[in-house]
Amino acid sequence: MEFSRCVERMTRMIKETTEQQSFERASQILSGKENTEFMDSENSSVTLDPKDIYMRVASNLELIQLYTTVNQQLVESYPRQCSALFRRTTTSLVGIRETLDQLKVQISFKHDWFPKNKPLSYWEFFNRFNLETEKKEQAVNVKKFFLRYQSPIIPQTEENLRNLQRLIVLSNEFSRCVTRSIRSCCCIGGNDVLFGRHDQAKIILKITFEGQQFDVVGPHGNTIDCMFFPCTQKEQVVIEQKK
């Protein structure tokens, strides 16, 4: 549920900052402190700085990318294990990912990550951090990026406004799917579960840690589902599954 709230807040932030180009408004939405009239004096002073906003959006995109990849693999490889609700949720996520990559932005600072005169999408800008942080040689560039960082501007072109409307529709659809899944949790079928599934976890472990799945025959003929995680990249480990 929290994931869908994050996507919803991000969508609302994109819509309202496109209209107002307001850093303060972006901070209010992402921090969940929109209704300022009901805040106490302590909470009303809490705002997100530009780096916090960037990191929250980058985290949202990382999750969208992860579950888009994982869920698509499940739908393609195990179609019978994926219900209509699961497929609809995955379609919404894929659409959100594609729309964010079509939403164009403009930046007012220079950085090696973003070549001058090259069109830049919302996805490319906020996901670049996720692509570069694991590279040690990019540490200086990461620091330089945040020293120069300024919030991007989303031009109000016809194409951007169309993509924005599509993003709102997809975000609402994703939120409805998640809500339906939670409300039905007492009688929901295993194939309707959207997150925290065993088959999702296996794919995530394979992607994140290069895990290799194999089976071990246990007592009384039971099969134990195992996964091997290599601790080095110097050697190639091949697991032969005995039939």
Image (tube, helix red, strand yellow):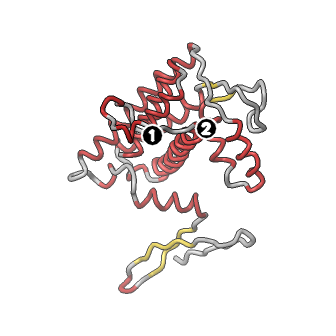
Gap between marks 1 and 2 measured at Cα: 23 Å
Residue at 55% from the left image edge and 33% from the top image edge? 98
Q: Position of residue 65 (x, y in %)?
A: 54, 44
Local crowd size for mark 2, using a 10 Å CA cut-off: few (<14), some (14–19), many (≥20): many
Identify the residue shown where x is 48% and y is 79%: 216
Mark sitting earlier along the chain (1/2): 1
In the picture shown, does residue 103 fall above or below 42? above
Can you say whether 217 is above or below 210 in the image?
A: below
Q: Which residue is mark 1?
A: 46
Q: Is residue 76 left or right of residue 135?
A: left
Amino acid found under the numbered disc labelled 2: Phe
Q: Secondary structure at mark 1?
A: loop
Q: Position of residue 91 (x, y in %)?
A: 45, 37
- 236 and 119: which is toward the camera: 119
Front position among marks 1 and 2: 1
Residue ID for mark 2 = 126
Kind of residue at badge 1: Val
Answer yes or no: is residue 91 visible: no
